Image (cartoon, rainbow, N blue to C red):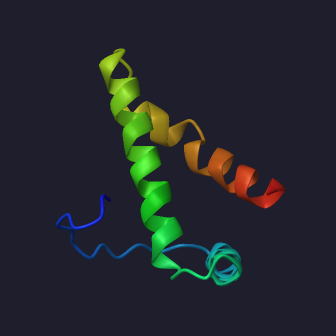
Amino acid sequence: MKRGSQGQTLSVWIDEDVAESLTILAMKAGITRSKPVSNILEMATNDLKALDKVGCSATDGITSGYARGVHEAVQKG
């Protein structure tokens, strides 16, 4: 989300280990936990929009393991 833009609260349920990892990473960066979550959701949304533009269903992107790939990338650092 761009600075100064409007937004809204979105509640999500995530695994406890993911929440713990986000907390640790956010603390290291000196930011709130919601900032990396917001950034990740924005990147995923942009990826899904790109898939949609080339004719892939957004649900294809979600069900093909997108979250797993992001999770693995975060774990690798």
In the rendering, at what x and y percent does residue 5 appear? 20, 63
Q: Is residue 27 above or below residue 7?
A: below
Which residue: 17% across, 67% down?
6
User: Where does the image place residue 48, in percent across and percent down from the top left?
Assistant: 39, 36
Looking at the image, which residue is at 40% across and 25% down?
51
Residue 5 visible (yes or no): yes
Quadrant in which the N terminus is drawn: bottom left
- Is any part of residue 57 visible from this angle? no
Residue furthest toward the left? 6
Frontmost residue, 3 versus 36? 3
Above or below, 31 relative to 65: below
Direction from residue 22 to residue 49 in the image, left or right: left
Q: Position of residue 23 (x, y in %)?
A: 64, 82
Place of residue 70 in the rendered image (x, y in percent of width and height, measured from the top left): 63, 50
Q: Residue furthest front?
A: 4
The answer to which image quadrant residue 31 occupies is bottom right
Q: Is residue 36 above or below residue 69?
A: below
In the image, taking residue 13 as reference, residue 69 lies left or right, namely right
| Residue at the far right in the pictured view | 76
Q: Residue at x 82, y 54 (%)?
A: 76
- Say left or right for 18 vs 11: right
